[in-house]
């Protein structure tokens, strides 16, 4: 309920979460709420840690302070990522959002390393932890705050497809675990004089490090360039194939320049005897309609294919028989015959499973095996094979 009220207030009721301005407002909302909540938790836990002399509580307090700093970075990241395209960055600045998430992750890990050092020092020089009910209850209340903050960021992250907010939600959920462990260590002071505070501090620090490492993995992947969603691939292919005269598609490439900034290109096959102006109009229509439908920028390459003759059909079927038993070959396209008489080229592309390539089998080995098999059946053909890798 509170999340919806805050969201409605921040966006002025605008629910177009793919709009960059709306995304920015949602990001600012998440950042401001994160700063307020984490600063309150930091001050509260810092006070409790000093009162009861617990390094574990203090570690948790400064973890919340790093979360507040992370929220500031989130706001700056959303601000910069919404900058318009310019000469140096013609596709916008959307990837800055990923960079801000990466900075957040490194800050989380820095806190973890610092408190491993502090906790080891507490183990070497133990101090008694003083249990008090009021600080303990306040600590439990802080756990509820973090649960809400995790749900809040997860909901906003899902609405605007933000890796930064989803990472923040994961971090907040990790804080629920660390604070719970700290509360247990505080409660243990009622029943034992064993100085477990330092050991609990190490556990908290390790949990913080793990959360930071997980965030780095999640945010660095889109920066490197990760595979597009399989559902989106199928939707684009099926969408292009739904248009008149288009008989096949291949070589789909999807580029991500940040949330809501996706570009895709694909080759569309059509019979070579179709009037160029006719197919050009169809391609233009497909680009326009599918770009709007899938909220990306789609470029379609016109790829004319040879009209089927008896020779082409026979040769294509022979090649299909040759490659069908090869588990690494997934499909074939752009099949054509060029030349006359006894000197003809069979030209085609094959798609292979890139994950299956290793030192024992190379692309050249695959080409050579297929060419040799074709030569055995049809020695008049010279093979020109292009390999496309699919992962």
Image (spheres, rainbow, N blue to C red):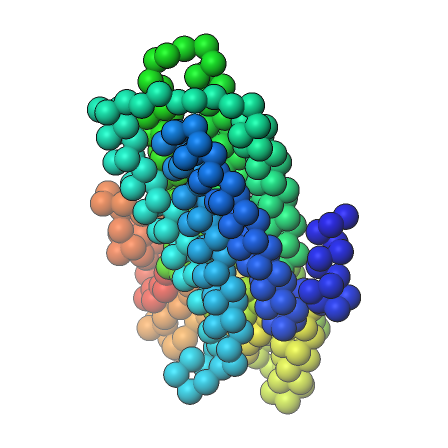
Q: Left or right of 333: which side holds 32?
A: right
Considering every residue shown, the one lying at the far top of the view is: 191
The x and y percentages for residue 155 are 65, 50
Identity of the residue drawn at 63% across and 42% down: 148
Considering every residue shown, the one lying at the far bottom of the view is: 277
Identity of the residue drawn at 52% across and 71% down: 79
**195 up-or-down from 334: above or below:** above
Identity of the residue drawn at 64% across and 48% down: 152
**22 up-or-down from 145: above or below:** below
Is residue 81 at all visible to an observer of this figure? no
Residue 281 or residue 77, whichever sits in front: 77
**88 up-or-down from 368: above or below:** below
Is residue 370 at all visible to an observer of this figure? yes
Residue 284 or residue 3, whichever sits in front: 3
The x and y percentages for residue 216 are 39, 49
Considering every residue shown, the one lying at the far front of the view is: 51
The x and y percentages for residue 386 are 36, 64
The total number of labels drawn is 0
Residue 218 or residue 106, whichever sits in front: 106
Quadrant of the image occupied by residue 139: top right
Q: Left or right of 168: which side holds 377?
A: left
The x and y percentages for residue 359 are 22, 45
Q: Left or right of 84: which side holds 213?
A: left
**233 up-or-down from 108: above or below:** below
Identity of the residue drawn at 77% across and 48% down: 1
């Amino acid at each position: 309920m509170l999340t919806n009220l805050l969201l409605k207030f921040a966006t002025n009721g605008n629910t177009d979460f793919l709009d960059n301005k709306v995304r920015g407002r949602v990001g600012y909302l998440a950042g401001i709420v994160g700063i307020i909540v984490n600063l309150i938790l930091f001050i509260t836990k810092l006070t409790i840690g000093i009162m009861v002399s617990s390094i574990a509580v203090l570690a948790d307090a400064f973890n919340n302070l790093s979360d507040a700093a992370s929220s500031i970075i989130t706001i700056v990241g959303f601000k910069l990522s919404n900058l318009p395209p310019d000469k140096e960055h013609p596709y916008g600045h959307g990837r800055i959002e990923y960079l801000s998430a990466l900075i957040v992750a490194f800050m989380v890990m820095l806190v973890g390393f610092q408190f491993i050092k502090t906790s080891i020092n507490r183990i070497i020089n133990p101090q008694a932890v003083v249990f008090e009910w009021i600080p303990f209850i306040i600590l439990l209340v802080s756990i509820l705050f973090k649960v809400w903050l995790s749900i809040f960021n997860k909901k906003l992250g899902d609405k605007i497809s933000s890796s930064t907010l989803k990472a923040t939600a994961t971090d907040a959920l990790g804080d629920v675990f660390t604070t719970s462990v700290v509360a247990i260590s505080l409660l243990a002071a009622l029943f034992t004089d064993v100085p477990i505070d330092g050991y609990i501090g190490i556990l908290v620090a390790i949990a913080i490090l793990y959360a930071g490492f997980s965030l780095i993995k999640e945010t660095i992947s889109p920066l490197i360039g990760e595979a597009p969603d399989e559902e989106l691939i199928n939707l684009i292919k099926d969408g292009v194939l739904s248009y008149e005269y288009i008989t096949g598609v291949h070589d789909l490439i999807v580029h991500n320049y940040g949330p809501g900034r996706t570009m895709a290109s694909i080759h569309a096959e059509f019979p070579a005897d179709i009037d160029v102006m006719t197919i050009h109009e169809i391609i233009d229509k497909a680009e326009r309609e599918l770009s709007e439908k899938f909220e990306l920028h789609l470029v379609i390459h016109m790829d004319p294919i040879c009209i089927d003759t008896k020779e082409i059909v026979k040769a294509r079927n022979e090649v299909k028989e040759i490659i069908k038993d090869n588990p690494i070959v997934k499909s074939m396209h752009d099949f054509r015959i060029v030349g006359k008489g006894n000197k003809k080229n069979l030209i085609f592309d094959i798609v292979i499973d890139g994950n299956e390539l290793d030192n024992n089998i190379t692309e050249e080995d695959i080409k050579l095996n297929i060419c040799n098999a074709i030569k055995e059946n049809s020695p008049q053909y010279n093979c020109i094979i292009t390999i496309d890798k699919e992962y």
